[in-house]
Amino acid sequence: MDAIEAVRVYTALQAQDMPVRIEGGWAVDALLHIHNPHDDLDLLVGNEYESQCRKIMPEMDYSLSRDKSPSKLDSRDDKKHKVTIHFGSISNGTLRRKTSTEVFVYSTEAVEGRINGTRVRCVTPKDLLERYKGSTRDKDRKYCQLLQNYLDSYNNS
């Protein structure tokens, strides 16, 4: 997925007054002001926005390709762009996202990043680091190193 499409999808959901956060590889890039190729865009929203997401994605020419409700929806368009919307329950300043095997806990705080010059709201670097920690995938280990360097430089300044 290219940056223009990632921004288009993100801004369309934001325009619906949905507190959406970018998660995954695009969040790492947005926070660190770098650009890597990405197969998909991962977004994180509260459970209460699932019906809104189901409505808006087809309006943007995305069709549902995999329904893993209540945890996530995967959608694709005819250009092979993929968007994964992860849902979680919000309480006490956290969003809890469950998968079939894990529970991820995110702060409801958002951190500003940029994709293609557009301001976007991302999950925190600390939450991203926690998500990728322990992964054996080379790409995820690279993300961990980049995020740790970012956090170290931020804490030392």
Image (tube, rainbow, N blue to C red):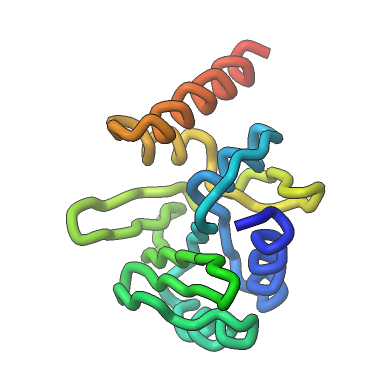
**Identity of the residue drawn at 61% across and 83% down:** 61
Q: Indicate the position of residue 104 as horizontal and vertical percent values.
A: 32, 49
Q: Nearer the viewer, residue 100 or 46?
A: 100
Q: Nearer the viewer, residue 157 or 60?
A: 60
Rendered view: 138 above or below 35: above
Rendered view: 150 above or below 132: above
Rendered view: 40 above or below 115: below
Rendered view: 32 above or below 30: above
Q: Indicate the position of residue 62 as horizontal and vertical percent values.
A: 55, 80
Q: Indicate the position of residue 116 as horizontal and vertical percent values.
A: 77, 49
How many circles with numbers are drawn on the protein?
Answer: 0
**Identity of the residue drawn at 20% across and 61% down:** 100
Quarter of the image for the C terminus: give it.
top right
**Identity of the residue drawn at 51% across and 57% down:** 40
Q: Nearer the viewer, residue 119 or 91?
A: 119
Q: Residue 99 falls in which quadrant of the image?
A: bottom left
Q: Indicate the position of residue 6 as horizontal and vertical percent values.
A: 65, 60
Asked whether, in this view, residue 62 is left or right of residue 16, the answer is left
Residue with the most extreme top position: 156
Residue with the most extreme right position: 117
**Identity of the residue drawn at 59% across and 23% down:** 150
Q: Residue 3 falls in which quadrant of the image?
A: bottom right
Quarter of the image for the N terminus: give it.
bottom right
Residue with the most extreme front position: 79
Residue with the most extreme left position: 101
